[in-house]
Image (cartoon, rainbow, N blue to C red):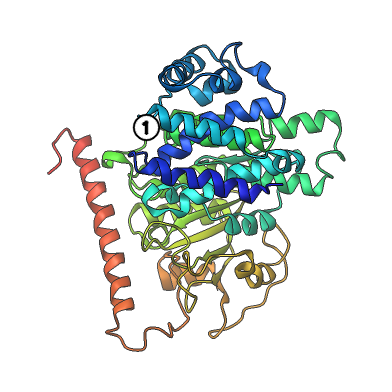
């Protein structure tokens, strides 16, 4: 009997066959999404969602060029004539397969797999799809690592934020849905797989508890498929959180997200008009959206690159506004190498929206350094949940960050810094370092020099984007 992991391995190995015919990794996963959707509806008895004549057996029953032409017709038909989730997954779809033999092999091999084990596990099909997404993200050539947040990190964050039944959970940069699915699984684990809830509460959890926006249509397809296989039927829309769709998202009790890195495409400002501090830096825009979109008393955890902690100008204003409106109680400095973009250094900001006032909510910020003197993570040294255990113990179990904590001093990884110290000593920079890097014993060592160069480059890139945006506003042409 094939295990879920066996099926993942066999499906991924098919990619190696198709790669020789020029099928890119990310295109392959999208192609699998179309075919697996049809197959899963058959395996789970939900083919009534599909129009008669456009189902798995209709595709499987054809051969050669006839099958290939029918498949192309099927994609267009379901994208135009399908309903609800079906149309959302297939809209504007097209195949990247160029050879009828490749389609035939995919259909034959998918049909021949033993699906019993995956179906018998209530979470089996979801685990299978997550496994494929993880394989795709781990393959650097796919470029998928930019939207795939490592699952051990997600699990750690969700276990600390503790989403509850009845709460609205939002991800304005949903990617393939990792945060929303982990939040749903956490609620399920706390409510006896939702059976401890009333029927009305169960319907809310499946259909109204989760909101997400994803800008890229190909990624949005993966998000919808992933959510479906995990039993989530909530609104997960295609749209730009830095545009009007983001402004229309409902207020949330919990926001969990990993916004995309970099500046807004073309260096322009966000198109939505409700952000207090307009900037082409996407992370600063997303950060404003997040703390503005929280309900009073709501909590958030957001993955952000280092430049958000030290950027000057608008960056300082956004950080001050965040620390006024919210209790920024914890910053986790993440290790390098856990994302698949080379050299990206990231952090997790944990904060709670003030209930009664919009000023002075942050009294102190605790910083946990999980980066200095840590291994370089990657395929050889994979990140696991075990790497977050000491951090989870140090931060405590209170999801609002108010549990008892201990400052570990200059030799420890966890330290407390008052709001006054941050203002007076750091001029509201949150780029706080104290541990000595054992790999950089001399001031001229390459790691430290490379780090300084990377910071200078990032600041210059941001400044250039701001200047281009200003020039565009004044009606000039970028240099």
Q: Is residue 220 visible?
A: no
Q: Position of residue 124 (x, y in %)?
A: 69, 43
Q: Is residue 209 left or right of residue 358?
A: right
Quarter of the figure with residue 197: top right
- Residue 336, quarter of the rendered image: bottom left
Residue found at the very far bottom of the displayed protein: 441
Residue drawn where x is 44% and y is 71% of the image: 424
Q: Is residue 335 shown above or below 98? A: below
| 347, above or below 246, in the image | below
Image height of 454 relative to 302, above or below: below
Pick out the residue farthest to the front: 63
Q: Position of residue 101 (x, y in %)?
A: 42, 30
> Residue visible at 64% across and 32% down?
228
Q: Nearer the viewer, residue 410 or 39?
A: 39
Pointer 1 residue:
271
Taking the image as drawn, is residue 325 in sight?
A: yes
Q: Nearer the viewer, residue 292 or 106?
A: 106
Q: Is residue 82 left or right of residue 451?
A: right
Is 155 left, or right, of 149 in this rendering? right
Give the total number of marks visible in the rendering. 1
**SS class of the residue under badge 1?**
loop
Q: Residues within 10 Å of mark 1 (few under 14, many from 20)?
A: few
Q: Position of residue 326 (x, y in %)?
A: 58, 53
Residue 60 versus residue 326: which sits nearer the camera? 60
> In this image, 317 relative to 234: left or right?
left
Measuring from the top left, give residue 338's x and y in whole percent: 48, 62
Q: Is residue 266 above or below residue 57?
A: below
């Amino acid at each position: 009997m094939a295990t879920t992991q066996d099926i993942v391995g066999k499906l991924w190995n098919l990619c190696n066959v198709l790669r020789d015919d020029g099928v890119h990794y990310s295109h392959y996963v999208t192609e699998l999404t179309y075919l697996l959707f049809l197959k899963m509806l058959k395996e789970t008895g939900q083919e009534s969602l599909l129009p008669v004549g456009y189902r798995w057996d209709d595709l499987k029953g054809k051969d050669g060029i006839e099958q290939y032409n029918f498949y192309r017709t099927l994609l267009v038909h379901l994208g135009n004539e399908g309903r609800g989730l079906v149309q959302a997954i297939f809209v504007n779809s097209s195949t990247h397969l160029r050879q009828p033999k490749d389609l035939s092999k995919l259909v034959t091999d998918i049909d021949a797999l033993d699906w019993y084990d995956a179906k018998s596990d209530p979470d089996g099909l979801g685990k299978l799809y997550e496994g494929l997404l993880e394989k795709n993200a781990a393959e650097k050539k796919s470029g998928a690592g930019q939207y795939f947040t490592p699952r051990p990190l997600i699990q750690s964050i969700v276990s600390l934020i503790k989403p509850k039944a009845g709460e609205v959970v939002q991800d304005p940069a949903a990617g393939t849905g990792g945060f929303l699915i982990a939040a749903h699984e956490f609620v399920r684990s706390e409510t006896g797989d939702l059976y401890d809830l009333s029927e009305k509460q169960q319907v809310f959890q499946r259909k109204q508890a989760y909101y997400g926006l994803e800008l890229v249509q190909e990624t949005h397809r993966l998000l919808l498929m992933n959510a479906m296989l995990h039993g989530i039927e909530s609104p997960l829309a295609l749209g730009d959180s830095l545009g009007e769709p983001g402004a229309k998202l409902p207020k949330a009790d919990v926001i969990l997200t990993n916004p995309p890195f970099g500046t807004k495409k073309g260096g322009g400002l966000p198109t939505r008009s409700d952000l207090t501090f307009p900037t082409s830096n996407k992370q600063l825009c997303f950060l404003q959206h997040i703390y503005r979109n929280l309900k009073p008393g709501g909590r958030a955890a957001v993955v952000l690159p280092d430049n958000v902690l030290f950027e000057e100008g608008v960056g300082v204003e956004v950080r001050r506004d965040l620390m006024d409106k919210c209790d920024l109680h914890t910053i986790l400095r993440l290790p390098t190498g856990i994302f698949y973009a080379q050299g990206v250094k990231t952090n997790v900001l944990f904060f709670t929206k003030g209930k009664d006032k919009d000023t002075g909510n942050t009294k102190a910020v605790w910083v946990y350094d999980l980066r200095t003197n840590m291994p370089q993570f990657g395929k050889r040294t994979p990140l696991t949940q075990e790497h977050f255990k000491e951090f989870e113990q140090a931060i405590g179990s209170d999801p609002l960050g108010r549990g008892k904590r201990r400052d570990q001093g200059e030799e420890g990884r966890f330290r407390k810094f008052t709001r006054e110290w941050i203002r007076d000593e750091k001029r509201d920079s949150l780029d706080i370092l104290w541990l000595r890097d054992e790999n950089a014993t001399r001031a001229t060592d390459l790691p430290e020099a490379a780090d300084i160069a990377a910071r200078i480059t990032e600041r210059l890139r941001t400044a250039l984007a701001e200047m281009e945006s200003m020039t565009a506003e004044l009606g000039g042409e970028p240099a």
